[in-house]
Amino acid sequence: KLSNRLQAIAEFVTPGNRVADIGSDHALLPAFLVQSGKAPSAIAGELNQGPLLAARKQVAAAGLAQRIDVRQGDGLSVIGPNETDTVTIAGMGGALMRDILEAGYRDGKLEGVKELVLQPNIGEELVREWLLRREFALLAERILEEDGKIYEILHAAKNGGSHPDGRKLYDREWLGAQVAEPLLSSVVMKMGPYLLRSPNEVFFKKWNSELKKMNRIAEQLSQSELPEAGKKLAALKSEIAAIEEVLRCLQ
Ligand code: SAM
């Protein structure tokens, strides 16, 4: 059975779209998408030999070799022109994901791509910032917990997409938080504009635990004698205060 995480990613894929799953590992996601009839065909991209073989094995065992092409390569380099409608990338850090997207963008690999479904394990703000910079509109976000881990999934489309807010990802009036710019923007990018609009239990759990971690770091910094410690502590303290204020506004 597919994990809830991969299932939630699959739910964001527009039916009928051809998918490229980058960093596919065992190719479970493309196998599910094709098998369920949601995607007519898919590419499973993998950089590393071990996962590549796992993907080939999985695709062959499911009898899907005609419809899922397993390709070895770095990031979006495995995509040919006009081959893909949806790119999914899941289960890696936000910095790597951002670098893969940016390299692909520069190589024109995203030109025909209509939507992105992204599940960074950490550093979600790096991915949100990249989407904004490269004019992919964030359409929806989801946060879920599975086996003690919390995951966020971002759904984005080429700008001109139907999201009514366009590039305006948050609304100061709506949020009502007493936090000055640019700190407010950076906190919204971290926490997620849509997740902030309809926060669930998992969202509060994540941010309460993040605040605990941040407070622990602040404690360490306050005892540090390193030259930059004071400056870092001040920045961290304002960030903690901003997140607390935003959470207070949501309660
Ligand atoms: N996407 C699957 C999932 O979410 O369950 C697998 C996630 S797995 C933890 C990350 C995979 O990304 C690994 O199999 C790794 O080999 C692959 N990977 C890492 N860097 C990559 C890159 N630059 N291009 C393609 N694949 C990459």
Image (tube, rainbow, N blue to C red):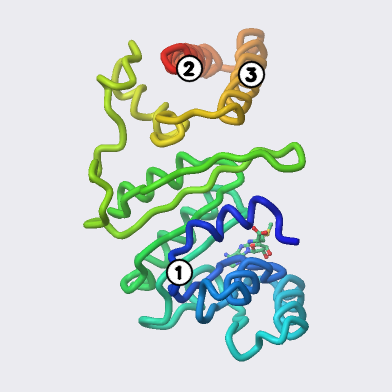
> SS class of the residue under badge 2?
helix
Q: Amino acid at mark 2?
A: Leu
Tally of numbered discs: 3
**Front: mark 1 or 3:** 1
- Left or right: where 251 falls relative to 173: right
Q: Residue at x 29, y 22 (%)?
A: 174
User: For the residues marked 2 and 1, what is the alpha-carbon distance in whole angstroms?
Assistant: 36 Å
User: Where's residue 12, x and y in %?
Assistant: 48, 57
> What residue is at 57 percent from the left and 23 percent from the top?
204
Closer to viewer: mark 2 or mark 1? 1
Asked whether residue 208 appears in the rendered view, the answer is yes
What label sits on residue 95 in the rendered view?
A: none
Q: Amino acid at mark 1?
A: Pro
Q: Is residue 231 visible?
A: no
- The residue under the point 51% across, 42% down is 142
Give the residue pinned by disc 3.
217
Locate residue 44: give its quadrant: bottom right
Q: Which residue is mark 2?
A: 247
Where residue 23 sits in the image (x, y, percent)? Answer: 61, 65
Q: Which residue is mark 1?
A: 15
Mark 2 nearby-residue class (10 Å; few <14, some 14–19, many ≥20)? some
Q: Quadrant of residue 110?
A: bottom left
| Residue for point 65% across, 17% down | 212
Q: Position of residue 101 (x, y in %)?
A: 44, 60
- Which quadrant contains ligand 1? bottom right
Q: Give the mark nearer the N terminus: 1 vs 3.
A: 1
Q: Residue furthest bottom?
A: 66
- Whole-number angstrom distance, CA of label 1 to CA of label 3: 44 Å
Determine whether, in the image, residue 130 is placed left or right of residue 100. left
Residue closest to the eye, 11 or 122: 11
Please determine whether, in this image, residue 58 is positioned above or below residue 171.
below
**Left or right of 82, for residue 147:** right
